[in-house]
Amino acid sequence: MHIWIELVFWISLGIVTLVTLGYPVFLAVAAPLMRRPWLITDAEPFVSLIIAAHNEERTIGQKLDNVLALDYPRDRLEIIVASDGSTDLTDEICESFRDRGVLLRRFPRTGKTGMQNTVARTARGEILVFSDANAMYQPDAIRMLVRNFSDPAVGCVCGQLVYRVHREGAGNCERRYWNYEKFIKRRESELSSLIGANGSIYAVRHADYVEIPNDLISDFVEPLTLVACGRRVVYEPEAISVEDASTSYADEFRRKVRILTRSIQGLLHMRALLNPFVYGIFSFQLLMHKLMRYLVPVFLVTAAASLAALAALGLYGILFLIVTIAAATAAITEPHAGVTRANPFVRVCHILRYYMMVNYALVLAWFNIFRGKRVTLWTPERKSA
């Protein structure tokens, strides 16, 4: 009997390791060998920058000042703020920038995707750049984005999001995770096509833009839709957007549940892309980067349960004890969050807590999917930039 339990444990642990470490190793080896370059020039197409905002009075003024200072020809840049039913001073602040060329589009509470669909219909730009109100661009960010559209095969470009953190805790763990994620993005882009973008900074060729249902997450599903249409999605690390990371695990947890619920829903909507006979290596990327990662909690549970059963049978007792202590330590880490400089032990505890939090958020996201809950609206969790 214990042989079958051991088999379950090692298979579960192996799958988690394969998804978390094996796939990045594969990309590190395969991407340089099979790299598909794309054309880049210094073109300056007309750009519409679309900023999604909901109750962003604390950041929208800074964001517009940031945009107006970008190193891009002002006569080639249309700036549009899409205000999603804001009830604070967001709209009034945007109106104060009207004489500097900022256009305000007011919407009843609609959701980001619905606003983007509507604004895209009348935007004048050859390239549509999508941004959040708390995302501060480096001066050359748009220039770096649009240079990739010189290649007619490119339909979408994702820039690099950089998290700004000042203390140990949820924000620093998010930054560490995001550095891992950016490595994967770069390699996937080189190998075939990027899987998704990020709402902070990404661009779509206007002619290729596809309206998607309002309850789907636009920065994930729009790029997938373009891949399905035969376009390429690429990563541009020189186009940099800076955001403050979350300051608490509670804020980050709520954000994760919302984003993961919409991402799983989007993946299921675009499940045809998992067919390797049609989409080749991209299907493998989508399988490993998204579907299998979203299923990691299942294998963590089976690994934990089988390890507990083995410990009860007198096997793997020391390993079970180490895992239990590590999980318990991570679970009580938050009261110590916020130190400016943490020792290695505290950092490891935060990383473990963050990992547990993300996988619990995945469990709740799947629960939302199974009970048919749709997440269309959003409330920004990060209040400053």
Image (cartoon, rainbow, N blue to C red):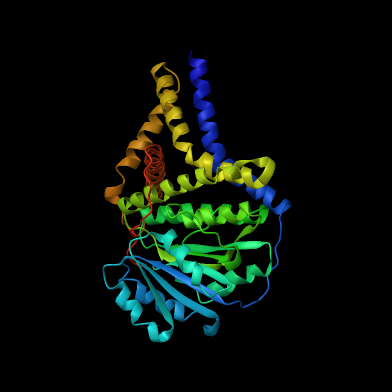
The residue lying at 26 percent from left, 67 percent from top is 87
The residue positioned farthest toward the top in the image shown: 1
User: The C terminus appears in which quarter of the rendering?
Assistant: bottom left
The residue lying at 57 percent from left, 71 percent from top is 127
> Is residue 151 or residue 375 the one in the foreground?
375
The residue positioned farthest toward the right in the image shown: 33
The spot of residue 149 in percent (x, y) is: 64, 68
The spot of residue 74 in percent (x, y) is: 52, 84
Q: Is residue 20 left or right of residue 154?
A: left
How many numbered discs? 0
> Is residue 155 or residue 333 the one in the foreground?
155
The residue lying at 38 percent from left, 83 percent from top is 98
Q: In terms of image quadrants, where is residue 95?
A: bottom left
The spot of residue 302 in percent (x, y) is: 45, 28
Up-down relation of residue 243 to residue 3 (above or below): below
The spot of residue 232 in percent (x, y) is: 64, 58
Q: Is residue 192 left or right of residue 136?
A: right
The residue positioned farthest toward the bottom in the image shown: 99
Q: Does residue 143 appear in this view?
A: yes
The residue lying at 63 percent from left, 71 percent from top is 147
> Is residue 196 or residue 322 the one in the foreground?
196
Q: Is residue 364 left or right of residue 68?
A: left
Q: In terms of image quadrants, where is residue 312?
A: top left
Up-down relation of residue 208 to residue 350 (above or below): below
Up-down relation of residue 73 to residue 356 (above or below): below
